[in-house]
Image (spheres, helix red, strand yellow):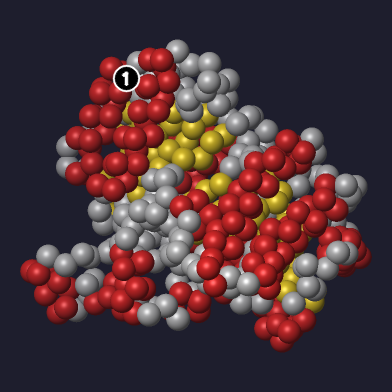
Amino acid sequence: MTDKYLQLVNAGPTRNVAKKLGLPRPAPLRRYATGDPLVTKPVLVLGDSAESDAVSTSLLSWDVEVHRHALADEQLSAIVVLLDELSHPDQLAGHVLEAGAALRDLAPGGQVVTISRPGTDGDAPAVAAARQGVEGFLRSLAHELRAGSTANGIQLADGVPPSSVGAQGALRFLLSGRSAFVDGQFLLVGDETGAIPADWHHPLAGRVAVVTGAARGIGAEIARTLTRDGAKVVAVDVPAAGQALAAVANEVHGTALQLDITRDDAGEQILRHCVDRHGRLDIVVHNAGITRDKLLANMDADRWNSVIGVNISAQLKINEVLLGSEYFTDSPRIVSLASTSGIAGNRGQTNYAASKAGVIGMTRATAPLIAEHGGTINAVAPGFIETEMTARIPFATREVARRLNSLQQGGLPVDVAEAIAFLAAPQAGGINGQFLRVCGQNLVGA
């Protein structure tokens, strides 16, 4: 669905009117297309830790111009701040304030990325305060940026260097147009597993991916994005959506599987189709989901059970089959669709929120099981995304939902698809059991 307000305040005579009236002016976001350069202007790297040079070296190897100090009147594509060796809150000031002074040079659609360590139970109080302080700083800074710019962080578990595969993969994702609607979020890299792809523009080459709920909307966009990145896609949806499903499968040159994922043998059918038609299965995206909204006082068993059945119980059954199969052991990836409703709750969505919170819990608990095969499982939690479903929301409510985030606009299905494609890629191998919000830093939730 088109956001006409965004168009009106950014073009033609209405642009000046909006400016004079001081109306909110959400900026068009920079989104990725195959072959795009990672950035078009220099990147400022701040930090004096031992690994800051390694980060600069990675950027240089990606044909990025790197500055270690801000230059007067030169626009920047991004500012990367190394805070990985903090041991006391007093140490925050130096590079944080240096980054602040450079913000006026940040080009529209620019990025600020911090690289830090997460707090752990064994931290000394001062260390814990410093590490937690980065989160408050970064989330607040994301609210302050304008012109489509974003601020996100990479957290590295103790012992994981900023030069690790996972850190490099996360940095490329956050610097690129692939993360256009990700704002105020942290990606935790827990270990050094993963691999640098032979081709950053086609990191999924040779992989076979299943996408459930692929007949339309976000699912169809996931199928297109995984295909663009090199994967062979198996599009799955219910028989009633067969015509639309076939159209998507034909468009992406994949195959279609008509299947009710709540069937007890859904996992076996998915595996059989993939092995028979493509010889392998590497990636499963649990996108299929339904809503049956009602206040709990008016909720009946059918509404509750159907949402739980499709949104989480089906995933649990399918995952159990996958994790027991010899055909799903080559650095496998599972990515599930959660929701910001599962984090913060939403009126009239007790069943939906329970199912999506369940996805986050399942993801965390399954992580060590799939790690035994060098694999990962993660979740993506979209906020307000422009879809056929959100287009049916009453106008006033829809406008409020669109503007209540740092980027003052709704996301697009491709924004969700980009996050999923990244988490399914080899360079995200060190990210396991996490959930990533794709919500423009919506005010709902953490």
Q: In which quadrant of the rendered image does the C terminus lie?
A: top left
Q: Is residue 30 above or below residue 429?
A: below
Judge from the rendering whether residue 54 lies leftward or rightward of residue 432; answer left or right. Answer: left
Q: Amino acid at mark 1?
A: Pro
- Residue located at (57% from left, 34% from top): 189
- Residue located at (36% from left, 73% from top): 398
| Frontmost residue, 308 versus 317 | 308
Query: What residue is pinned by disc 1?
Result: 89
Judge from the rendering whether residue 278 lies leftward or rightward of residue 368; answer left or right. Answer: right
Quarter of the figure with residue 268: bottom right
The reply to whether residue 321 is in sight is yes
| Frontmost residue, 44 versus 37 | 44
| Frontmost residue, 324 versus 327 | 324
Q: Is residue 51 above or below residue 175?
A: above
Percent position (x, y) of residue 48? 36, 19
Q: In which quadrant of the rendered image does the N terminus lie?
A: bottom left
Judge from the rendering whether residue 433 lies leftward or rightward of residue 58; answer left or right. Answer: right
Judge from the rendering whether residue 159 lies leftward or rightward of residue 441; answer left or right. Answer: right
Percent position (x, y) of residue 89? 32, 19
Looking at this rendering, what residue extends furthest in the top direction? Answer: 124
